Image: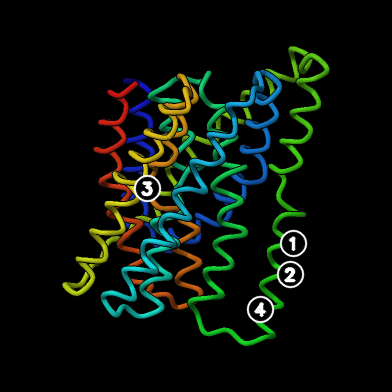
């Protein structure tokens, strides 16, 4: 109960700040920088050395790629059937295919499944959702937006730069190595624990500051379809695959719940930057966060 209360309070404080503090949107840049460059690597370095690796870890990676690939195939087909614009299809692929497995995923997994499930959440996020965003998201942005050759080349360079300069990638490699050597000294492990512990309150506060919701009548159908895939149908398919493959808890629970996370904030930003129907993308993000509170709570009863 305490963990859920922390999630709610931090998110609400972010919303209140956004409404009452001038220029609150500018807060998210330094907050997100801390989360991605300090708190996340520290969390990875603290958790991964304690993770016991086995072949079932494939499920955590495949679950995220399945959500992304299913969204792309499904909404591309629906777009042709319903004569949607390329921008609409691209917006739905990005926001229904990419989940907020970090800013919302880690806190929710910790609150529902406990801290011992967080290492699996890291694998699903970094190896699945993050790589889907970096590679798949960039391809979708290129396919469904109007780009020239120069911008395509710049996008390719950006993908490489993000991979090279992303601290958590190096933290994963180092964390695996340290785990193979027996783990961190006690004092260093305690320091990493404290740094990593800042991720949950800061990430949820940042998400609250960025919360927006606007939807027009012609977007209601696509919005409902996008959220139905992201929050319900996709996770159910992931659950069926995991159960059939004999994946047990807590790995099955983490894979399903990470698949069921609300749309990724960065996916909506990418859609906005490439003019992929930004109002629809932002509505997917905002309403998805609200509805995911209900769907994730329901999913918790499965495990």
Q: CA distance from mark 2 to mark 1?
A: 6 Å
User: Disc 3, disc 4: CB below 8 Å?
Assistant: no
Above or below residue 104? Residue 176 is above
Q: How busy is the neighbourhood of tag 3: few (under 14 within 10 Å), some, or many (20 plus)?
A: many
How far across and down, in percent of the image, does residue 85 sit?
35, 80
How far across and down, in percent of the image, does residue 77 sit?
36, 68
**SS at circle 3:** loop
Q: Residue at x 30, y 24 (%)?
A: 302
Q: Residue at x 47, y 22 (%)?
A: 246
Front position among marks 3 and 4: 4
Quarter occupied by the C terminus: top left
**SS at circle 2:** helix
Q: CA distance from mark 3 to mark 1?
A: 27 Å
- Numbered badge on residue 157: 2
Dot 2 or dot 4, earlier in sequence:
4
**SS at circle 1:** helix
**Residue 20 shows in this picture:** no
Camera-side residue: 240 or 213?
240
Q: Which residue is mark 1?
A: 161
Camera-side residue: 260 or 113?
260
**SS at circle 4:** helix
Quarter occupied by the N terminus: top left
User: Disc 2, disc 1: CB below 8 Å?
Assistant: yes
């Amino acid at each position: 109960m305490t963990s859920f209360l922390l999630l709610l309070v931090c998110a609400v404080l972010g919303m209140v700040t956004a409404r009452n503090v001038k220029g609150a949107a500018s807060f998210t840049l330094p907050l997100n920088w801390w989360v991605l460059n300090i708190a996340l690597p520290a969390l990875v370095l603290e958790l991964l050395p304690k993770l016991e690796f086995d072949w079932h870890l494939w499920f955590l990676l495949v679950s995220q790629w399945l959500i992304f690939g299913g969204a792309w195939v499904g909404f591309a087909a629906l777009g042709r059937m319903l004569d949607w614009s390329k921008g609409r299809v691209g917006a739905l692929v990005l926001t229904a295919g990419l989940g907020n497995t970090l800013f919302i995923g880690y806190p929710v997994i910790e609150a529902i499944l406990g801290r011992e499930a967080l290492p699996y959440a890291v694998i699903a996020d970094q190896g699945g959702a993050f790589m889907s965003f970096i590679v798949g998201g960039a391809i979708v942005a290129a396919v469904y937006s109007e780009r020239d050759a120069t911008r395509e080349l710049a996008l390719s360079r950006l993908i490489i730069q993000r991979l090279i300069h992303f601290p958590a990638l190096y933290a994963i490699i180092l964390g695996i190595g340290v785990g193979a050597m027996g783990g961190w000294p006690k004092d260093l492990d305690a320091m990493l624990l404290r740094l990593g512990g800042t991720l949950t309150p800061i990430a949820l506060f940042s998400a609250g500051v960025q919360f927006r919701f606007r939807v027009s009548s012609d977007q209601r159908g696509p919005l409902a379809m996008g959220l139905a895939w992201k929050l319900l149908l996709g996770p159910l398919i992931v659950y069926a695959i995991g159960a059939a493959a004999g994946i047990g808890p807590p790995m099955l629970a983490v894979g399903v719940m990470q698949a069921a996370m609300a749309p990724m904030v960065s996916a909506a930003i990418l859609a906005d930057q490439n003019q992929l129907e930004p109002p629809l993308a932002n509505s997917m993000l905002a309403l998805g966060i609200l509805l995911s509170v209900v769907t994730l709570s329901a999913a918790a009863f499965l495990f």
